[in-house]
């Protein structure tokens, strides 16, 4: 079977664990050479690279805390030096923190906006400069939360609503360069981060399962499969979309 991303170069931010790691693995399985970005877990990124290599693929780990604007160009440069011009960018790195209105602080705001919105914009800016004339695909990992808007999520929901808006704008702005821009908006997926936050059990998970027509949380591979589709030629006429992979709540 032909691999849909054979000969392509993909960069996945925040790919040392969780959804990002699964995206890197699936892009590699379709033939892409993958740059696995990490902020703190070199061990996690190296493990993803090793798994890709063991399956016959090509990958490198590239360090960069994308909340720090000065870290972005070196990370992009390292990717291009190791693998060549970028064809696929997946903006997966992000943080989330839930607080009621009364507890919101500037620090709470900036921690999320500096990575989820400003970091995403600056990474996209730097990566787009390294796309070839043939164009490519940018996939922003947003969240189903951007439209579900649960209580106590004002800042995080705002960051993801911003990602949805940025996706629509850049789809138009980059179309003349043959760069497609889409967002994937996952529902709850039980990743390491979700477990650490305690959302994999209790009221949050019960609410998700109760309001989701499919009646369950998602799996990382279900999100990665949609990202992989959007990265490839099968989605060549798809741009400016936010594809909700949430099990059906509205």
Image (cartoon, rainbow, N blue to C red):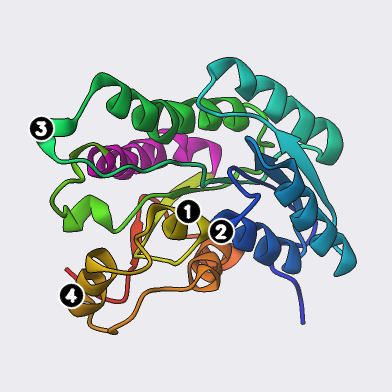
> Which residue is the site of mark 3?
102
Q: Are marks 1 and 4 in contact (CB under 8 Å)?
A: no
- Quadrant housing residue 108: top left
**Among numbered discs 4 and 2, the one appearing first in the sequence:** 2
> Which residue is the site of mark 2?
18
Relative side of 249 to 79, left or right: left
Relative side of 226 to 142, left or right: right
Residue 73 sits inside the magenta stretch: no
Measured as percent of width and height from the top left, residue 245 is found at 37, 68
Question: Considering only vertical position in the picture, is 76 above or below 54?
Answer: above
Q: Are marks 4 and 3 in contact (CB under 8 Å)?
A: no
Q: Main secondary structure of the magenta part?
A: helix
The residue closer to the viewer here, 171 or 216, is 216
Q: Are marks 1 and 2 in contact (CB under 8 Å)?
A: yes
- Quadrant housing residue 170: top left
Work out how far the residue at label 1 is from the one at label 2, CA to CA, in angstroms.
8 Å
> Which residue is the site of mark 1?
193
Residue shown at 47% from the left, 33% from the top: 120
> Which residue is the site of mark 4?
211
**Number of other residues with Cα within 10 Å of mark 1, as a class: few under 14, some 14 to 19, many 20 or more:** some
Work out how far the residue at label 3 is from the one at label 1, CA to CA, in angstroms.
24 Å
Relative side of 90 to 76, left or right: left
Residue shown at 36% from the left, 50% from the top: 240
Q: Secondary structure at mark 1?
A: helix
Q: Secondary structure at mark 2?
A: helix
Dividing the image into 4 quarters, which one contains the N terminus?
Answer: bottom right
Q: In this picture, which residue range is highlighted in magenta?
A: 156-178
């Amino acid at each position: 079977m032909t691999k849909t991303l054979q000969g392509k170069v993909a960069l996945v931010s925040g790919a040392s664990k969780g959804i990002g790691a699964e995206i890197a693995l699936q892009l590699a399985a379709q033939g892409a050479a993958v740059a696995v970005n990490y902020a703190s877990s070199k061990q996690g990124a190296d493990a993803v690279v090793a798994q890709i290599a063991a399956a016959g693929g090509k990958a490198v780990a590239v360090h960069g805390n994308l909340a720090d604007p000065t870290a972005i160009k070196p990370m992009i440069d390292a990717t291009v030096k190791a693998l060549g011009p970028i064809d696929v960018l997946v903006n997966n790195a992000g943080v989330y923190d839930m607080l009621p209105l009364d507890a919101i602080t500037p620090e709470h705001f900036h921690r999320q906006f500096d990575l989820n919105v400003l970091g995403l914009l600056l990474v996209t800016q730097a990566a787009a400069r390294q796309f070839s004339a043939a164009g490519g695909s940018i996939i922003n990992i947003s969240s189903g939360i951007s439209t579900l808007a649960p209580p106590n999520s004002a800042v995080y929901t705002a960051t993801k609503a911003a990602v949805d808006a940025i996706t629509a704008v850049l789809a138009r702005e980059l179309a003349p360069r043959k760069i497609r821009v889409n967002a994937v908006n996952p529902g709850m997926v039980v990743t390491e981060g979700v477990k650490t936050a305690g959302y994999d059990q209790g009221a949050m998970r019960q609410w998700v399962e109760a309001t989701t027509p499919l009646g369950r949380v998602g799996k990382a591979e279900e999100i990665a499969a949609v990202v992989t589709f959007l990265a490839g030629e099968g989605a060549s006429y798809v741009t400016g979309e936010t594809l909700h992979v949430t099990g059906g709540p509205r």
